[in-house]
Structure formats: structure tokens, C-alpha cells
Amino acid sequence: MKDYAIVSTKQQLKSALEDNISQIIITDAELAAQIKTLKNASKAALAATIASAGITSINIWNPIGWGAGAVGLATGGYLLVAIVALLGVLGVTLIYAIYNGYSIRGKGSVTTPDGTEYEGEIILEKNGA
């Protein structure tokens, strides 16, 4: 079993998280930026933003949903954009898995056991692995 995954899409990230991969090398700059935003959020901001994104998507036709979305955007800003971008593919459970279960090593190159070198925008490493 490989203990690393090379990821450039949200779907590939989802698969790596579901497979419990210990090192995830993210090569796409936009996806890496979304993950950095997510990882830099406080737990309270993350929970409020996920709740706000959920309320907005469910109640988009309802003025109450607009108000909740506006509050979330005002308090979450970039975090809300990152959550909405990730939520559709990953879902809340995998977003929390990234937030709680992985740390960011940063941008850099990684040499895999077979000698192949990859340039990662960020490298996620499973906590305790």
C-alpha cells in the first residue's frame, strides 16, 4: 500500500483522504490555497462557515438564507469561498479530517520511494503517522 498520493483535483484529494493516505502532495496551486485557508481557520470560524454555507445552499430561495449567507460571508470571507469550493466534493466529514488529522509541511519537492520527484504546492502529512 502506498503511503503517499499525488493530488491535483478535489476528487483525487477525496480519494486520498478516504484511503487514509499518510502523505498527500497537492500540486494544484488553487486547491493548495483552499486547503491553506481551511487549515488556518479557527475551529469556531470553520464551524460557523460550514453552517453558513449549508444554510445558504439549502435556503438560497429564502430571504432568511440570504441573511445567513451574508453573515457567513462577512465573518468568513475567504474561508467561506474555500469551504464552498471544497464542500461539494469532499463533504463536511472529509473537511474536518483535513482540519484535524493533517498538518501542512509547506511547499517543496518530495522524492517518493521509487525515486520520482514531485513538486508540491503544499504537502499534507497525517498527524501521528
Image (tube, helix red, strand yellow):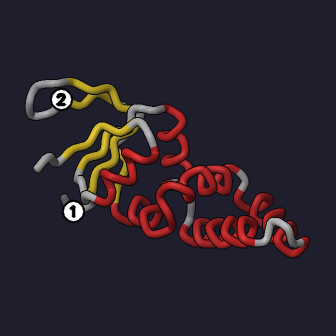
Which of the 4 image quarters holds residue 111? top left
**What kind of residue is marked 1?**
Gly
Which of the 4 image quarters holds residue 67? bottom right
Residue, x 25% and y 57% (percent of image)? 19
Is residue 112 shown left or right of residue 15?
left
**Front residue of this view, candidates 14 and 105:** 14
Which residue sits furthest right?
Answer: 63
Residue, x 15% and y 33% (percent of image)? 112
Q: Residues within 10 Å of mark 2 (few under 14, many from 20)?
A: few
Q: Are marks 2 and 1 in contact (CB under 8 Å)?
A: no
Q: Earlier in the sequence, mark 2 or mark 1?
A: 2
**What kind of residue is marked 2?**
Thr
For label 2, the residue is 111
Q: Secondary structure at mark 2?
A: strand
Is residue 42 shown left or right of residue 3?
right
Residue 104 coordinates in the image, percent (x, y): 37, 48
